[in-house]
Amino acid sequence: MMLHRGTMKMLSDLISPKALERLLSDGARERNTTLSALDIGTLQDILKRDIYRRLQLSIPAALAKRRVQEVLDSLSQEQLQETVAGHSTQILTLEDQAKQFALYFDWPETQRLRAVLSVARQTSAEGRDAETLLLEGSELIENLERKLSEGLVTQGQDLSELKASMARVSGVGGPKIKRLDALIRQISEAQESRILLPAEVERALALTLTLRKQVESSVVQQLKSNQQREMVDSLNLGPEEVQPFDLSLLPPEAQARVQTLEREHEARLLSELTREYASLLPLNAAYAQELQALRQRSDGGEVLGEEVTTLRGQLADARTEAIQAQQGHLDTLALRLSELRGPPGDTAHGDDAAQVARQGLLVARQTLQGGALATDELAQLSELVRTLETGDSLERERLMALQRETFELERRAREVPGALGDLAPLIETARATLAAGRVADLEPLWSVLERRMGEAAQQRENMDARAERVMQDYNRYRHLAGETIQKLGRLADVLRGQQRLGVLSSDARSRYIQTLENAEALLTEAHAEFQAARDVTATFGADALSDLLGVFDPEAFDGQDPAADLLSTSSFSAPEPASSAEVTAADLSGGLSSSLNDDPFGLGLNDRPLGHPGSSLVLPSFETSQPFPVASRDFGQPEQPGAASYATPGLQPAGHADAGPLELISGLVRSWLVEQGTVTQGDLSPAGDWATETECEADVLRLAWLAGQAAELFPSRLSLETPGRSWLVTPQSAGGMLVVCAPDPQRASEAAGRWKSRVAQQH
């Protein structure tokens, strides 16, 4: 039945149905709607104006007013029923959304959400409005989703660090390694399912600390037998993951490393204590100061030992005592609220202001029963009860609304950097004004908050821009080897997760800033390492290979032909003079191939062959025009007879003022000129599996460096085959190296030949 049918039925004894329907239809049309689409609010307006005037034509005004009021009351009751039904649906929806946070029952937000939904169900079942409670429930769900997303980013960072640590300690063996591996797999599965496992992460980190201590104690092999037994027993006895042992048994360097590990672990524990007891510390200045003092001592390099564990126990006891004290305060407020009596016709039990206070009382009680503090709720409830005890009904409604607004303002200010410091004194002044029964203007306070919110939004933009720069710069150096790049890669992954987060909590914002600072510091180190590697390549002289390896010392060959002895293997004959000889990396048997392990770039030449990550070196070869040099010769000297020619299109030799731009040969044939460890000419733009210019440059410098190591062989060219690529390096008479990359050896040789022709034409 449409809404207007009930109205027509209730007034059918005063106005004919046809006339009443016409009045309702005309009223709906004047309000830009139709009779069938009337809502309760519009129908009430038509009753108060059009129907009431029409009834006064036939009945006294007092009777007309009473009959219209009866219809309005009926509509209000119907509206309330619809609202209650809608609230029931919203409660079910919120309860369904809250299920995903059931695992995090110790979170204050979860405990409050449980209390809010419980009171909302009770209020709705009694037929009263629960709109305020439902709005708070929705906001708590949003806060929980944000906290979960932020926690997943942190857990992902912990997981990457655990995996990196696992690689360091896996050689220890034993049941602890198996337990750590199982924990890491469990955390990985939870991360993929968007589930937080803080207890498992804490156990894994503690176990990692013990294992890393055990790795550092590897010097136990150098100790006396009784010291060995003492060390091993201290590391393996007992079920606890973190097990102390006597640092005095270790050398000073190992002691320093172990202490660094312990300080890092303790700093993490102190940060977790700060977050876990964030609601308690403002109530207990002594513990807040003690925690701050411990953090300062830890930052100063001191190992705290059992003091952290002791403080954790003290904070847990203090929170229990604070909950009991707040329960007593709540009982006092409940008694004061029950004693309130309003003026005749307006009992405290029936008005909206008292009902709001009672809802707050129930929420606070259930929050405390759940094990969480209800500091803000009690403060707000105290203000409401004091206002209810004074003033008339209309005035106290307004004052209570403003009091609730001050607490909302304070809560939002906590999440905006710098806002609470600006607003705290202003909020206290406003509350004092309201407590005196006067109205306070809160608009200036909201303006301060909005200004700080704008600054926070700009700060977030800057943080995201810094994160983007870090990730872009990391891509330039990601091909490098070493601990610095590995750490930077893990932080880059964390920054990607933090960048995707929406509105940040104050804690997440602090972690974001800390991650940026750490990543930028590592990026500076990576840049310095890369630049140092490039400088090192420029310092290699003709005797570098002899100095590093000693394989070209003529005395080492006992009077034999050095070249024939060096180049001969089970599958290759000694080369004839002026002919080419090919040597594999394995055939050098610790000679040239050993120099590859001394890669000055730190780029992992053996682990990541040129241009193809993860492949193995296929076939390096040298072509030499002499069996072995008697004296060192510089590449800048004229060519020896029989030396291979070299050229590449578009590449001008060094020293020519009219050198034109380099051209890219079709089929990914590229040529570069390397002088003193720097690519001075050539196209380094990304192509193929070169994701960045730096990756391309690193491969070119590797080849030039490798050819430089064989300088004492007087090579006319160096060729290297990697999957999908053929490399050719030839020294120039004017100095430097020409590096050519092509799909096959023939095209590489053709490119070198074209280079020779181009040089000849220019001369």
Image (cartoon, rainbow, N blue to C red):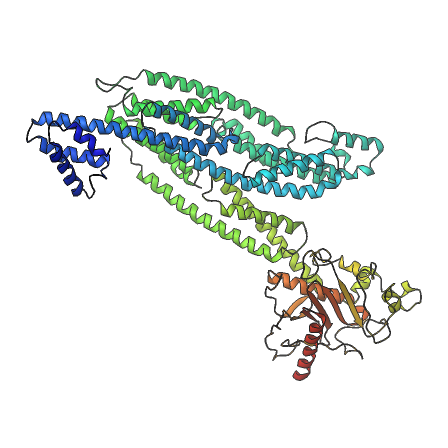
Give me the residue at 65% from left, 42% from top.
163
Q: Using the image as rendered, state which of residue 346 and residue 226 is in the foreground.
A: 346
Is residue 216 visible in the rendered image? The answer is no
Q: Residue 715, how many percent across, how many down? A: 78, 71
Give me the residue at 49% from left, 24% from top.
371
Reply above or below: 704 against 183. below
Give me the residue at 90% from left, 69% from top.
561
Residue lying at the far right of the rendered structure: 559
Q: How many marks?
A: 0
Q: Which quarter of the picture shows residue 602?
A: bottom right
Q: Which quarter of the picture shows residue 26?
A: top left
Give me the residue at 40% from left, 46% from top.
454
Q: Is residue 7 left or right of residue 690?
A: left
Reply above or below: 633 against 132. below
Q: Using the image as rendered, state which of residue 58 and residue 293 is in the foreground.
A: 58
Q: Is residue 671 left or right of residue 195?
A: right
Q: Residue 554, how many percent across, how many down? A: 89, 66
Q: Using the image as rendered, state which of residue 89 and residue 97 is in the foreground.
A: 89
Q: Residue 179, how many percent across, how many down? A: 69, 34
Position of the C terminus by quadrant: bottom right
Q: Is residue 593 left or right of residue 684?
A: right
Position of the N terminus by quadrant: top left
Q: Residue 410, how many percent across, how many down? A: 39, 34
Q: Is residue 705 left or right of residue 199?
A: right
Is residue 371 visible in the rendered image? The answer is yes
